[in-house]
Image: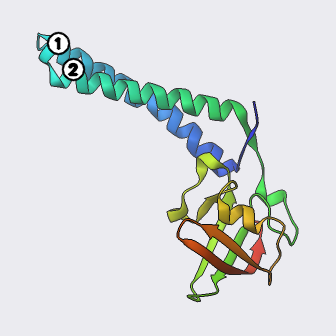
Amino acid sequence: MEKIPLTPAGHLVLKKERERRASKDRPTIIAAIAEARAHGDLSENAEYHAAKEQQSLNEGRIKELEAILALAQIIDVSKISGDTVKFGATISLVDEDSEEENTYQIVGDPEADASDGKISISSPISRAMIGKEAGDSFEVFAPGGSKSYEILSVEFK
């Protein structure tokens, strides 16, 4: 299996989520199932079926998190340097059409959250930026059409 690159912060967030789901959410769901079971006929017990579904989703997410954490390759971004865009870089860029400026950090797939300024290493915009430097322009082909950007700065923090 292929390693999954993660920043130390992203690894910690996933580890905490796994611990919370296993130590807090799991017992809560088990208690809800037991309470719903006590209400009698399970075939028409909506509370029971909802709790069982919640249990299934929680256990599935725990297994997913365990797989990610087992394959994690933690990359300490603070020890990376250079002028080119690569994993862990924090990039300031400007949309050449709208003049809108944004700052993103390139992170592993499981920790990506565009609303938090973290974009996946496998996203089209990240792949278009890899290897570029401050001052370089690049184009991203997206479903909504082509967009052009210019990189203002590349940092590793």
Q: Which mark is residue 48?
A: 2
Q: How many marks?
A: 2
- For mark 2, give the secondary structure: helix
Q: Secondary structure at mark 1?
A: helix
**Which amino acid does the dot numbered 2 rest on?**
Tyr
Q: Is residue 11 above or below residue 141?
A: above
114 or 19: which is nearer to us? Answer: 114
Q: Is residue 90 visible?
A: yes
Q: Nearer the viewer, residue 24 or 120?
A: 120
Q: Determine the CA span between mark 1 and mark 2.
A: 7 Å
- Residue at horizontal 76 percent and vertical 37 percent from the top: 3
Q: Position of residue 48 (x, y in %)?
A: 21, 20
Q: Name above or below for residue 141 compared with residue 62.
A: below
Residue 19 point in image, percent of width and height: 51, 32
Q: Return the disc, 1 or 2, that comes first in the chain's sequence.
A: 1
Q: Residue at x 76, y 41 (%)?
A: 73
Residue on which disc 1 sits: 42
Question: What residue type is disc 1 on?
Answer: Leu
For the N terminus, the quadrant is top right
Q: Position of residue 2 (x, y in %)?
A: 76, 35
Q: Splitting the image into 4 quarters, where does residue 21 fall?
A: top left
